[in-house]
Each structure stands twice: as C-alpha cells, then as structure tokens.
Amino acid sequence: MPVGGAPSTPTGMGSALPIALLLTLVACGPSARVDGSASASASASSAAPRPSSSNARPGLTELPADPPMKPPLMSSSDVGGGPLVGGVPLDKATADDVKRDEARKPGAILEFARVKPGDTVIDFIMGGGYFSRLLARTVGPKGKVYAYQPAEFIAFRAQYGTDQKTVADAYPNVVALNGPLGALAFQESADLIFTAQNYHDMHIAAFPENLAATVDAALFKALKPGGVLLVIDHAAAAGSGTRDSNALHRIDPAVVRTELEKAGFKFESESPLLRNASDPHTLLVFDPAIRGKTDQFIYRFRKPR
C-alpha cells in the first residue's frame, strides 16, 4: 500500500467533498499552477511581516543573513548537469515545464532549498509535477522523491492522479503517495520537504480548522534532524492572517512562519526571488491582471538537530 495509506475522507468531512472545496480545486487544478515573477528587491534576511490578528506571537527573532546565492544553475531542461534519471528523454510535460522556468526560477529555488544528489525529498502536494520532475533529476538515481498528492484532490479530479502516475512512471526514483491530508504518514525520513503554492490550502473553508496544525506536525515528524522545509506561497496582505486563503488563494506570510515555528521548525532564511512589490494583494491569484506575477514568499526552515 502506498505510504500515507489508502485514500479516505479526513476527519470533519463527509463522503462527498463540500462545494467550497470543489470550487477551490477547480481553480487550483493541475494545469492552473500560478507562476511567479520577481520584481521587488529585498534582503534574504529581511524580517517577515507579523500579523495583527490573534495569530501573532511575540518574541520572534531573525537569524543572520544567508550568504548570497549563486546564479541559477538549473532549469527544466538541464538539472544537476546531466540527463534525466535512467536516461529518460525530455517528454512533452518536461518540454512544457521549460516554458515556465523564467517565471518560476527553479534553479535558484532548488539551490536555496539546499537539495543535492542522493537526498530523500517529499514534494508535498505535487500538483502537475513541475517540481517533482526537477527534484527527481536533481537527487539522481541514488536519491528518492516522494510525490504526494492528497487523496481528497484525486477523488475530486482524476487528472491529479493521472499526473502523479505520469511522473512516477517516467522517473524510477519517484514514489507516488496519495493518502489523506489528515492522516499523513511516511515510511522514511526526508532530507527536504518541498511545497510550492499549497500551504494556504490547509486553511480553505472546506477543511477542518485544525488541519494546518495536524499537517505541520506530520511534516515535522517526517523530516530528518537538520533537514530543510521549503515553503513557497502567494502572499496576502500583512496582518490579514488566513482571511484570504479561501477566496484569493493567498496567505499572510507571518501566519505561515508562526504556525511552522509552533510545530517545532526553526526559521532560517527568506529568498526574494519571487517577490513583487507591485502586487496589490487584493486579487485572486488567477486573475489575468496578476496571474504569473503574484507576490510570492519563499521561506526556508530547518528541523533542529
């Protein structure tokens, strides 16, 4: 049985997905992943905004600035300086990914994530598999990528499962996981947990109120001591908390940091690669006026040794 258990309905949800979740998943379908762009300059050590809501937690401190990152070295057509795992040629999906590289800046992001050959990685909520393919090629034949797709998503739209199978079939070092979000379990510890444009989904109205805490605890347990958690998501207005997670698919970065630190993760650094100061933070991320140009934060956390 795949790691994470067989698909089932999480606690607090009926056998049929609520309308709110259906509408959310329509917007967040595998082909609807929103690419980001960086147009704002910021220091990698700049302080994360703090929410003015009850989510705020005083006493958070900043760590020393991260060393300057090297120029991007990787793309969807050349990751890790070699061919695809097992000699698999560039397929159509990968060719399509190449067109998205300029906006998503995968080389610099994976370098910031500190992923390396031989690592074990969990791609948490893999979507269409853009980063799953990149991660598989980066860790190489001695590494492994657990490509996790929530059972709830697959139950709603079969394409999620199809995309997951496509990636797993193409890369021998990819293991498909599809258990429910409320019952995450992994059979081995990971060097890196990677999640892109998904953390806000833990706070959509259709899911139980405590889902984020449950997921965060499971991710903390799954990460090796000293391992990295890399979170990318669409930024909401400072102080907005989780107010816009359901309607705009955004989340206040400070809430993400507070929740993950509460789970035991230690904030290490922020990358400005996908920040966009011109984003008003008031539009749905799929609105044509902002799609592909949303302000996105990239946070790196570690599990203490």
Image (cartoon, helix red, strand yellow):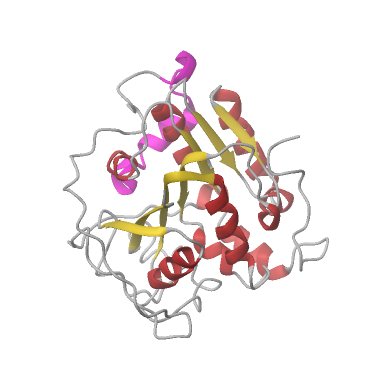
Give the residue drawn at x 32%, y 34%.
75
Furthest residue in direction top, as rendered:
87
Seen in the picture, residue 91 relative to 303 is either above or below; the reply is above
Q: Is residue 38 left or right of residue 261?
A: left
Q: Tell me how many marks there are.
A: 0
Give the residue drawn at x 63%, y 44%.
160
**Which quadrant holds residue 1?**
top right
Q: Position of residue 137 (x, y in %)?
A: 42, 27
Seen in the picture, residue 164 relative to 305 is either above or below; the reply is above
Q: Is residue 107 left or right of residue 2?
A: left
Can I make out residue 127 in this image?
Answer: no
Q: Position of residue 62 (x, y in %)?
A: 26, 66
Question: In the image, which residues are magenta?
Answer: 84-106
Furthest residue in direction front, as rendered:
305
Magenta span includes 96: yes
Q: Position of residue 198 (x, y in %)?
A: 51, 57
Can I make out residue 22 in this image?
Answer: yes
> Main structural element of the magenta stretch: helix, strand or loop?
helix
Q: Is residue 138 left or right of residue 246?
A: left
Give the residue drawn at x 74%, y 50%.
155
Q: Nearer the viewer, residue 252 or 120?
A: 120
Seen in the picture, residue 85 relative to 97 is either above or below; the reply is above
Q: Nearer the viewer, residue 197 or 68?
A: 68
